């Protein structure tokens, strides 16, 4: 059974905020942000919502797949910033699309979320539970940022990306399988507090609680070290599991947290930066949405050829990480 991506889509808010715009609001500078991260701007929601952007991205992915919403059988959405606790984002997208025959649920794995949702859908498809799936990474991170903490708020943005997966019987004469060839995922909850955003505190008739709402806090250097060490290893493991060599990979689409992290990963893998397209310059870090938006951008620029081998890789809060190898 081959499980292939047959459509992608993305959506970001209209408002683009540059580093210079932020330097008028807080003690930061274009020079600091750009030199430490590569980020030049981010798109921030004003009227947009996680659901609205996810549904827009999903609509484009469905259109490219040549499918109607009613044909969808599964929706798996990855987000840390849904619009509501209940219902989940996937159900909200199901409603927005009119995908009334789909089963819809969310996965929560922060910046690795798209990899986790793709792997979940891949397993459902390969097990024969359904024949197609919509996977989504969507975030409105700006609402959980502490806009008085310049060390975090300048890094993140809002947006959504989506992909339609389809299961196809493998042709026994086919020389090489296509679609998702392998996935390796990992988690380390013991180190989770380096990147956190607490939920609402216990609040009931037996507890007096006036704790203020929590926002994202991060030990940037610890996350940096974790990423640089773990991402090359998980990519190597996924490539080996696919029966390939790292040199044979055409493109590495990494979570867009920091250009320096991507350069360090490329160096450790002995691969040229030309194989690592980026869009963090324009969008910043959009957690679960980073990888699917980059995939959509790269595909729309004609950078993925039929038969091309690509790696998708994510890492972030949890700690969580993952990589998948695909033949297009
Ligand atoms: O998707 C989740 C994954 N997250 C990541 O991958 C983040 C990984 N970490 C990083 O990308 C980097 O650690 C950061 C970009 C977050 C920070 O870079 P850094 O080189 O580790 O800087 P730092 O935190 O050590 O801060 C250096 C200095 C500090 O000043 P002092 O103490 O040296 O005087 C900060 O107060 O930079 C200061 N600083 C800023 N200055 C201007 C921190 N934020 C800012 C800012 N503008 N926005």
Image: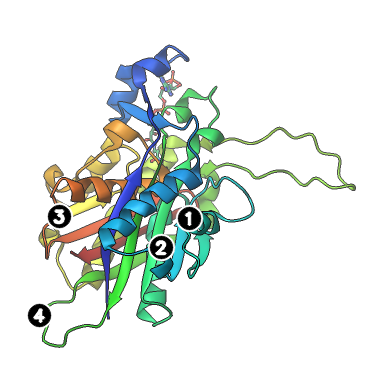
Between residue 57 and residue 209, name the one nearer to us.
Answer: 57
Find residue 311 and report its horizontal and vertical position in percent.
23, 58
Q: CA distance from mark 2 to mark 4?
A: 33 Å
Between residue 207 and residue 17, name the one nearer to us.
Answer: 17
Say which mark, if any, is on residue 175. 4
Q: CA distance from mark 2 to mark 3?
A: 26 Å
Find residue 214 and report its horizontal and vertical position in percent.
63, 36
The residue wearing badge 2 is 69
Between residue 164 and residue 28, name the one nearer to us.
Answer: 164
Q: Answer few, some or many: residues within 10 Å of disc 4's Cα (few below 14, many 20 plus, some between 14 and 19).
A: few
The residue wearing badge 1 is 109
Ligand 1: quadrant of the figure: top left
Earlier residue among tags 4 and 3: 4
Q: Answer few, some or many: residues within 10 Å of disc 1's Cα (few below 14, many 20 plus, some between 14 and 19).
A: many
Label 3's element? loop
The residue wearing badge 3 is 304
User: Which quadrant does the N terminus fall into?
Assistant: bottom left
Q: CA distance from mark 4 to mark 3?
A: 20 Å
């Amino acid at each position: 059974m081959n499980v292939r991506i047959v459509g992608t889509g993305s959506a970001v808010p209209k408002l683009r905020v540059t580093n210079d715009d932020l330097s008028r609001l807080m003690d930061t500078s274009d020079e600091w942000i750009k030199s430490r991260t590569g980020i030049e701007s981010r798109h921030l929601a004003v009227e947009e919502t996680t659901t609205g952007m996810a549904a827009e991205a999903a609509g484009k992915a469905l259109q490219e797949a040549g499918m109607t919403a009613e044909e969808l059988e599964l929706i798996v959405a990855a987000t840390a910033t849904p619009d509501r606790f209940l219902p989940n984002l996937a159900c909200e997208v199901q409603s927005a699309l009119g995908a009334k025959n789909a089963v819809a649920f969310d996965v929560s794995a922060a910046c690795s979320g798209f990899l986790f949702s793709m792997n979940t859908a891949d397993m459902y498809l390969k097990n024969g539970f359904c024949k197609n799936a919509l996977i989504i990474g969507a975030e409105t991170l700006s609402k959980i940022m502490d806009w008085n903490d310049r060390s975090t708020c300048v890094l993140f943005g809002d947006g959504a990306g989506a992909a339609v997966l389809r299961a196809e019987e493998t042709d026994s004469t086919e020389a090489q399988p296509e679609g998702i060839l392998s996935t390796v995922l990992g988690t380390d909850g013991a180190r989770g507090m380096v990147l956190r955003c607490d939920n609402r505190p216990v609040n009931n008739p037996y507890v007096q609680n006036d704790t203020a709402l929590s926002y994202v806090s991060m030990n940037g250097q610890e996350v940096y070290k974790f990423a640089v060490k773990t991402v090359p290893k998980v990519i190597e493991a996924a490539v080996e599991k696919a029966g390939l060599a790292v040199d044979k990979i055409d493109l590495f689409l990494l979570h867009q947290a920091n250009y320096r992290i991507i350069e360090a990963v490329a160096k450790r893998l002995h691969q040229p930066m030309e194989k690592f397209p980026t869009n963090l310059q324009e969008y910043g870090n959009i957690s679960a949405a980073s990888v699917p938006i980059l995939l959509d951008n790269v595909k729309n620029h004609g950078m993925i050829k039929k038969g091309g081998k690509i790696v998708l890789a994510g890492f972030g809060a949890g700690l969580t990480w993952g990589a998948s190898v695909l033949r297009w």
